Amino acid sequence: MTFLSLRSVFGISAVIVALCGLLFTTPSHAQDKPRFNVIRDVEIEATLKEYGRPIWEAAGINPDSVHVIVINDPTLNAFVAGGQNIFFHTGLLQATETPEQLIGILAHETGHISGGHLVRGSSAMKEASAEAMLSMVLGTAAAVLSGNPNAGAAVITGGQSLAQRSILSFSRAQESSADAAGMKFLDGAHISSRGLLEFLQKLSGQELLPIDRQVEYLRTHPLTQDRIDAVRYHAGQSSISDTKVSKRLYDLHDRMRAKLLGYLKPESALLRYAEKDGRISARYARAIAYYRKGDVDKAEKAMDALIKEEPANPYFYELKGQILFENGRVDDAVRVYKKAVDLKPDAGLIEASYGHALLEIQSSRYLDEAIVRLNESLKTEPREASTWRFLATAWGRKNDEGMVSYCLAEEALSNGDIGSAHKWAERALKLLPKGSSYVIRAQDIKQTRKDEDD
Ligand SMILES: [Zn+2]
């Protein structure tokens, strides 16, 4: 896989996380750190993009230009920021009971994108990973709001939730217009708006709670009875209100929620998905929970049974590869990851895991193949900082200091660390041979600015 890794925005290096397999480490000083942890998972992102595609098409937005980003946070929230990026808290994903509810929220967020209710991005942001970008969005917005260019850092080290609330929240007028646009997109995609209605009603129960106990979603998206009435009216009028999305989309929703629970709360997953529950989603949740609890044998057996049932499912091989890799069975992991990549060649994160496993075999025989695979993964995941770090390691083994410097410049850029990116790019320009195709890219990195809008 990509391991379903959690990466702290400023905290633990993803590389260290990957090598130690300490996927869910919380820094001991977590209190001063932002709460954001981005989860990268090919399967869940693919599900969200499949849900979003008809909505974005109805909105006249190119689906390939929209990014969906999952944040590990138990609160219910979703928001748009930094361009065409839709962020979902795991809490919200898990609180939706049907795909229609989730697609309704997605349509509403798309309404914010099409309405242009966004914090603008800088050129550095486009080059940054999702987590670095998010911290920039918060920093920039804080600085803009307070008129103080140094405010960003203060807000980020302070209460993140507060920052998010004040910066990313929309006006009531914007909320109503996002609902209206969202319902139009749902109609265009022939998807019932009743899911949106159900979810807003679920949230409205929260409005009666004291403000510190309300869900985040209400803070960023103020909810009024007018909004609920408008969506109810629309759903009442529409001829497609009683239609459901396909069984396949329901199945994807089940698997997504099962996977998240298995990873994030293995104990709860084993309770909710009891042994006698033979559904694939339930068995998947249990396999992940066993793995998260360190019961490798049970996890491996469960994965083998799932693979037998769905031998063309790349995500099952990906997870099995991860289990093997993290338990030191690197050769086995390589074989299984290869299968996952063959089944899903366009998934950069899976290919990066494969390349990383090849690199960990520590044999020069696999070094060139590791470089090929890591480079291949960057075609679809160019801002994955850990991949650049793996590549730097690979080039280091070949004693190519110019390429090491270049890769570290890209890594720093992905992390939003423009200062280090400039330094490494400068070093790369000194060491790379004239005529190297990487020289131009290193020059570009040297020109990246942090704050300029494009
Ligand atoms: Zn909203």
Image (cartoon, grey):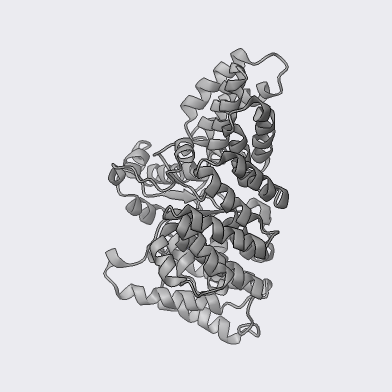
Q: Quadrant of residue 388?
A: top right
Residue sitting nearer the eye, 171 or 277:
277
The image position of residue 390, as x and y in percent, is: 56, 32
Q: Nearer the viewer, residue 447 or 34?
A: 34
In this picture, residue 158 sits left or right of residue 189: left
Please tell me whether residue 320 is drawn above or below residue 111 in the rendered image: above
Q: Which of the two residues, 301 or 440, is positioned nearer the viewer here? A: 301
* Snapshot quadrant of residue 330: top right
Position of 316 relative to 365 (above/below): below
Residue 174 appears in the rendering: no
Image location (x, y in percent) of residue 453: 54, 38
Q: Is residue 32 above or below residue 308?
A: above
Residue 305 on image: x %, y %: 60, 62
347 displayed left or right of 253 = right
Quarter placement of the C terminus: top right
Q: Is residue 432 visible?
A: yes
| Residue 435 in the figure: left or right of residue 193 | right
* Residue visible at 64% across and 66% down in the picture: 55
Give the residue drawn at x 35%, y 73%.
206
Viewer-proximal residue, 63 or 433?
433
Total numbered labels: 0
The residue located at (66%, 50%) in the rendering is 340
